[in-house]
Image: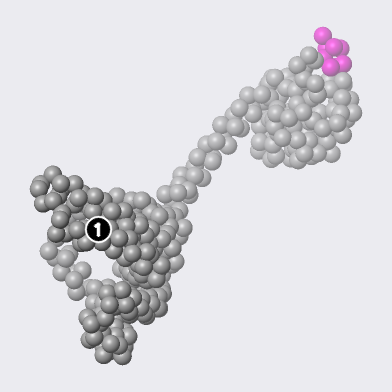
Amino acid sequence: MADDQDDSQKTEEPTAKRLQDAREKGQIANSREVSNFMIIGMATLLVATYAPYGMQGMSQALEGYLAHAATMPMDGPALGSRLKTLLGDVALLMLAVFAAFILAAFVAAGVQNGIVWSTESITPKFEKISPLSGLKRLFSLKSIVEFIKNITKMGLIATLGFAVVWPEHGRLMVTGRLEPAIAMGYLHDIVLMLLMAMSAAMAVLAGFDFAYQRFEFMKQMRMSKRDIQDEHKQSEGDPMIRQRLRGLRMERARQRMMAEVPTSTVVITNPTHYSVALRYEQGRDAAPVVVAKGVELVALRIREIARENDVPIVESPPLARALHGGVELGRAIPPAHFQAVAEIIGYVLRMRGAGA
């Protein structure tokens, strides 16, 4: 693509090839807010479903240690063994949490663009460490939009937190006087309400941000008419070169065709516009085969070669036109023309016999 073009020239929508090339390089429309929404949504789901079970398991794991804390042996091997068992129990409880958050990250990527594997984005590049490029990125329009978005997000989360927690501030002040199980259940409900409010807000923010990121990405991927022409040349080849190659292939095919004329049995003509050379050899051909054909100058050249090689030329305008338009090179004539061609070939063979 041309690098010496400004954005005003890029008025065309990106082609499928350009988007695919960008995808292979890891350049995709990606919204961080979608990932944040998935993580907060997963946290909400875990608090609503897994947290009670996890807290119960954690309580059971710690209960034995706390109940026998006074009599627990404190020597190195015994204490290490107990701590190892405790950490193992806690790790098993937390494993589901870690797996859930990893799943949320993959789902966020898959929802937006599918899973993209590319090392292009982590390949060291000078512009990534250039101070000048860093300053340009810092004060770019995209950075300003991201800054405003983050400030808005923080303000929204703070407002939601205040709206959820403030009505309960009186009860929160006395939770320390409640039974631990009752206090934990109450705090669980508060945290769940806060996460649900945050998830709803993040869903709206993620939708708007993904639309914006998609718009900016497609704008960045836009192409100029020259870009599209260059891409077409790269994928299909230069039109002039393709035309030249096509001409060479036609010329070689014509030369091979002309080389078959001296071995033909008869040439049927229009008499001036069409020429069709037929070959029929008993034991080799089940039916007469078209070995050369052409119109105008090609037809004239076929007749010249036929005369030079004493190949009989027979005028039959309807048959010449029919064979030229209905039979491909190297193919046997269809049964509909068997009688007409047989009469001509029989005539030619009788003339040769008489001449011999």
In the displayed image of the protein, which residue is found farthest to the front? 71
Question: Tag 1, which secondary structure?
Answer: helix
Q: Main secondary structure of the magenta part?
A: helix
- Judging depth in this view, the residue of 243 and 68 nearest the camera is 68
Magenta stretch: residue 265 in it? no
* Up/down of 306 relative to 103, above or below: above
* Up/down of 344 relative to 105, above or below: above
In the displayed image of the protein, which residue is found farthest to the top? 356
* Up/down of 349 relative to 303, above or below: above
Q: Which residues are magenta?
A: 349-356
Q: Is residue 149 visible?
A: no
Q: Is residue 309 left or right of residue 282?
A: left
Q: Quadrant of residue 208?
A: bottom left
- Judging depth in this view, the residue of 274 and 94 nearest the camera is 94
Q: Is residue 101 left or right of residue 16?
A: left
Q: Amino acid at mark 1?
A: Gly
- Judging depth in this view, the residue of 160 and 338 nearest the camera is 160
- Judging depth in this view, the residue of 327 and 187 nearest the camera is 187
Q: Quadrant of the C terminus?
A: top right
Magenta stretch: residue 355 in it? yes
